[in-house]
Image: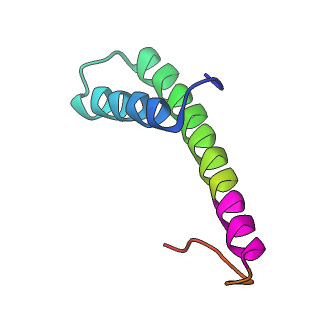
Amino acid sequence: MENLTFEESLEKLEEIVNKLENGDIPLDDAIDEFGNAMQLVKICENKLSKAEESIAKIVQDNGQIEDFSITE
């Protein structure tokens, strides 16, 4: 799963969420899918964090902004 792009990870996560929301899957399968979803969330968070670090470095290297962070 680590080799997936951010977009691929997000797409797979959305598929899992849709399956779980529909409720048409046995409990054991739902638990497995939930585990997969949590792995995908971690992958997405790591990729976003790396992107944020890269952007912050680029901005800092250009001398425009010292402290850059993405807030919700």
In the rendered image, the vertical position of residue 5 relative to residue 53, given as above or below: above
Q: Quadrant of residue 60?
A: bottom right
Q: Quadrant of residue 67?
A: bottom right
Q: Main secondary structure of the magenta part?
A: helix
Say left or right for 11 vs 34: left
Seen at 62% across and 41% down, the residue is 42
In the rendered image, the vertical position of residue 64 relative to residue 9, given as above or below: below
Q: Magenta residues?
A: 52-62
The residue positioned farthest toward the front in the image shown = 62
In the rendered image, the vertical position of residue 55 relative to residue 5, given as above or below: below
- 53 is within the stretch colored magenta: yes
Say left or right for 46 vs 22: right
Seen at 74% across and 84% down, the residue is 66
Q: Residue 36, how many percent across, how many down? A: 54, 26
Classify the position of the N terminus by image quarter.
top right
Q: How many marks?
A: 0
Seen at 63% across and 45% down, the residue is 47
